[in-house]
Amino acid sequence: MAQVLVIVRVLPEDVETPLDELRKRIAGALPEGYELKMWDEEPIAFGLKALRLAIIMPEQTEGGTETLENLISQVQGVSQVEVEYVNRLS
């Protein structure tokens, strides 16, 4: 089965949210077949930083990236989720 690389930008609820803990909670919430491959922090403004996550997921997922977006948005400490990039891996 083919896989898809999804780059997701995650905004925390506030400046005080520890991004490393948030990343770990998101990684722990991913279902089987999904894998967090890489991540980094992106400065936004006034001390707020976003998480940029590279996640591998199955291509044949019903609903496409919507399932992933909904899953991440339900993690405690997440304010907003935005898919920045999607690419099929061969």
Image (cartoon, rainbow, N blue to C red):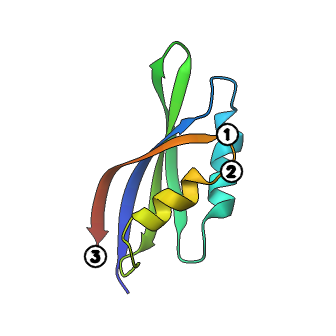
74 lies left or right of 41: right
Disc number lying in front (1 or 3): 1
Which amino acid type is shown beneath numbered disc 3? Answer: Ser
Q: CA distance from mark 1 to mark 2?
A: 6 Å
The residue under the point 60% across, 77% down is 32
Cα distance in 3D space between marks 2 and 3: 28 Å
The secondary element bearing badge 2 is classed as helix
Rendering coords of residue 24 (x, y %): 68, 50
Residue in the picture at 64% in, 36% down: 19
Q: Amino acid at mark 1?
A: Asp
Q: Is residue 90 above or below residue 87?
A: below
Question: Which residue was labeled with disc 3?
Answer: 90
| Placement of 48 over or under 40, stated as above or below | above
Q: Answer left or right for 90 relative to 32.
A: left
- Report if the CB atoms under discs 2 and 3 are less than 8 Å apart: no
Along the polypeptide, which appears first: circle 2 or circle 3? 2
Circle 1 is placed at which residue position? 20
